[in-house]
Amino acid sequence: MFESAEVGNVVEKKAYEKRLERLRTDLLRAQHALASTKFRLLVLVGGVEGGGKTEVARLFLEWMDPRGLQVEAYGDKSEEEEERPEYWRYWRTLPASGRGAILVGTWYTRPIVQRVFKDISEGDFDMAMDRVVAFESMLAREGTVIVKIWLHLSKDEQRRRFTQLEKAPATSWRVSKRDWDFSSKYDRFRKICERALAKTGTAEAPWTVVEATDRRYRDLTTGETVLKAVQDAVARAELPEPAKAPDRTRPPQISLLTRLDLSKSLDAKEYDHKMMKQQARIARLTRRLRSQGRALIAVFEGADAAGKGGAIRRLLPAMDARNARVMSVAAPTDEERARPYLWRFWRHLPRLGHATIYDRSWYGRVLVERVEGFCPAADWKRAYAEIAAFEEELSESGVIVAKFWLQISRAEQLRRFKDRTVTPFKQYKITEEDWRNRAKWDAYQAAAVEMFERTSTPFAPWTLIEAEDKHWGRVKVLKTVADRLEEELA
């Protein structure tokens, strides 16, 4: 794979200056055109040590408008990053639509280095590359233009460059012991990097291997590759967007929801006793989260007026208020719409030892956005796999995920709606949108059934709550959380 980047490409100074003038003009025009589209630009600069990754990143700030461009260099993890899933540091720095980012030291670096030093197996490395492909595919489908540049040097050229830099007092600081350690394993790095590029070069995110021996050739080739990708994206932006239409699928006659026994109930005395017992269990167990390197996420979905808020209010007091928070998910803001769908959830993930409770969640894409037609069908249909991958990452990083669907009958929902309408301190809970959603009961039930089937996994199972009786529903939520914590923290 890298042989074609060791053929001796060179650009003479006069030709370089002529091409560079045109390149810089075209890059600025393309960047400003991109700013008015839904697309965002990600340029991943990777390659061998000494290839000039930092120099190339700096050039783009010089050649393009830096107000619409950011450079992110990922080195060793901070304490905050160590306490979050691996990809959290990348998600939180994704640019908004119309903007761009140059990334150095990306999601490729860690698994490649780990495999070179045999810290992970070949199977684990392949799984890491599969995750990369899934991540980049999701980004591309969410409007991200991905340009991946690999700067290559031969073994002899890398060593010559290190020696030259090390001899000069002004540049000796640029060569570290780590660089020489990596250079000593050049052949193994080359083999593993070839495997990484072969597995992750896709139509949505192809690799461009650039011979980096001659700086002028390296810089022009990289710049022209980015220019072509941005120009193609601007041209695609003129195409009509996919149609959006409400989904009115009817639920099956027999399903997980229809089989729930909504007559289950608890009297007040039994309720108080069981609630206090489960809250005490949760209080005891959540204190062990940090010492075991774990965190907790509890997701609440369900029909309007099913009692999500009431269940959350009974769960929250069982936790240390300093380490728990509730996220109420409403319609996305302009800032959130300008980024991939899951960005708004990634950036609020809890640290180790902490808990986050979601009053509605990322499942909005396969519920309200599906039913109301807020996104194209292709978006919500692929969301099941993307959500499952997201939750698997959470689980692998130590997050315990508990998901609840609170179910009531249509008749009980109507009774609660009417009660909210006539009770002054409950009137804020009822809106015209609630009544409109009630008319789409069947469509929401159908969407929920498919959601359970496609996203209930061993690492993030759904628990269906019979919530017709509030006492029964709340206690079942508390007991399920306590049982899950006990199982995971055993």
Image (cartoon, rainbow, N blue to C red):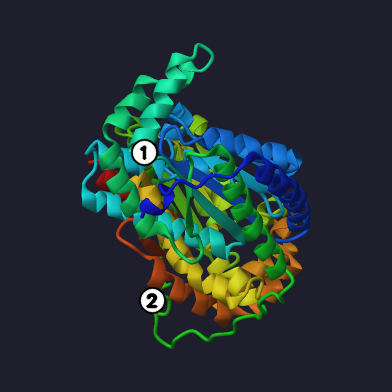
- Residue 259 drawn at (x, y percent): 37, 78
Nearer to me, 480 or 143: 143
Image quarter of the N terminus: bottom left
Residue at (45, 50) in percent of width and height: 298
Quarter of the figure with residue 238: bottom right
**Tag 2–tag 1 contact (CB < 8 Å):** no
- Residue 146 drawn at (x, y percent): 56, 56
Q: Which residue is tagged 2?
A: 256
Q: Earlier in the sequence, mark 2 or mark 1?
A: 2
Q: Which mark is residue 97?
A: none
- Residue 375 drawn at (x, y percent): 64, 71
Q: Secondary structure at mark 2?
A: loop
In the figure, is residue 111 to the left or right of 227? Answer: left
Q: Secondary structure at mark 1?
A: helix
In the figure, is residue 313 to the left or right of 431? Answer: left
Residue 10 vertical position relative to residue 389 in the rendered view, above or below: above
Q: Which residue is tagged 1?
A: 280
Quarter of the figure with residue 67: top right
Quarter of the figure with residue 443: bottom right
Residue 342 seen anywhere in this rendered image of the structure:
yes
